[in-house]
Image: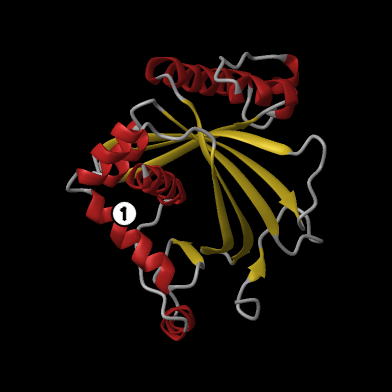
Amino acid sequence: MRARLKPAYPDADTAFTLVHTTYFDSPTLLSFSDYINQRPVRFKVRIRQYAPNGVWQNPCVSFAEIKRSENGVSKKERFQLSSNGLRTLLQGDAVTLTPDEEALNRSIGKERLAQRIELLNGLMSHHRLRPMVTVSYRRTAYEDGTMRVTVDTNLAWEALVAPPPTLAELMSQEQSWVYVEKMEQDYRRISGSIVEVKHRECLPDWLIQYMEDNQLVERSFSKYCWSQTQSLRRVLGEVARE
């Protein structure tokens, strides 16, 4: 990969990045359910934090992200959080447009920043979103003029809120549960490496060969869905032992 593409980082001295993501969901796991049922309109709220070369700064770079999908078209909006904004959001409270937030997001402008904060607060309030799980991984990123490739390894998850046993049982009995089982099988088969390719043109032959050599197949994969599934399985295992 390094022989074909250039590293894609803001700082030329960066060789890799550690990524820590906090995913939010409703008490009924609406975002999780919408995803595994592949509903045409769905959303995801998360906080992403970055550590270039594995070094966490204090404060670290943190972004609030809202990802929406409507009939197969995805749109992601995000803004950088101040330390106070980060604490507020992790507590499940509304983020306010402060001078600190404005200073961190000059590139998107005050009006667009206000719109994104309003959208985030609306979703948080309407769906009673709270932090549910975290996912951490090591990312290397590459690009050329028409393509970006990221390779994520060493995925680790942690449940912040354990789903109620009744909800875990209900989710596992849905027909769509086979979707997450297939995702788990694919993840185990590739030994925990996730390659994401964003491109505007046809894939080059060398990348197709790379995927074949590493037994990579095209699949839809959600880190939140995968981590929440592990959390649900843990609860189901605890229920089985009682």
* Left or right: 178 in relation to 217: left
Q: Position of residue 177 (x, y in %)?
A: 25, 50
Circle 1 residues within 10 Å: few <14, some 14–19, many ≥20 = many
Q: Helix or strand or loop: what does disc 1 sit on? A: helix
Q: Quadrant of the C terminus?
A: top left
Q: Quadrant of the N terminus?
A: bottom right
The residue that mark 1 highlights is 180
* Left or right: 166 in relation to 18: left
Q: Which quarter of the figure has residue 224?
A: top left
Q: As drawn, which residue projects farthest toward the left?
A: 175
In this rendering, the answer to whether 124 lies above or below 188 is above
Q: Which residue does the image show at 65% across and 76% down from the upper left? A: 2
Residue 40 in view in this figure: no
Q: As drawn, which residue projects farthest toward the front?
A: 242
Q: Nearer the viewer, residue 38 or 104?
A: 38
Q: Which residue does the image show at 42% across and 39% down from the upper left? A: 75
Identity, as a three-letter code, of the amino acid under mark 1 = Val
Question: What is the basis of the colouring in this image?
Answer: secondary structure
**Total tally of numbered discs in the picture:** 1
* Left or right: 229 in relation to 134: left
Q: Which residue does the image show at 77% across and 58% down from the upper left? A: 53
In this rendering, the answer to whether 59 lies above or below 240 is above
Residue 174 in view in this figure: yes
Q: Position of residue 163 (x, y in %)?
A: 40, 34
Q: Position of residue 6 (x, y in %)?
A: 66, 69
In this rendering, the answer to whether 42 lies above or below 135 is above
Q: Which quarter of the figure has residue 181?
A: bottom left
Q: Which quarter of the figure has residue 236?
A: top left
In this rendering, the answer to whether 115 lies above or below 144 is above
Q: Position of residue 165 (x, y in %)?
A: 34, 35
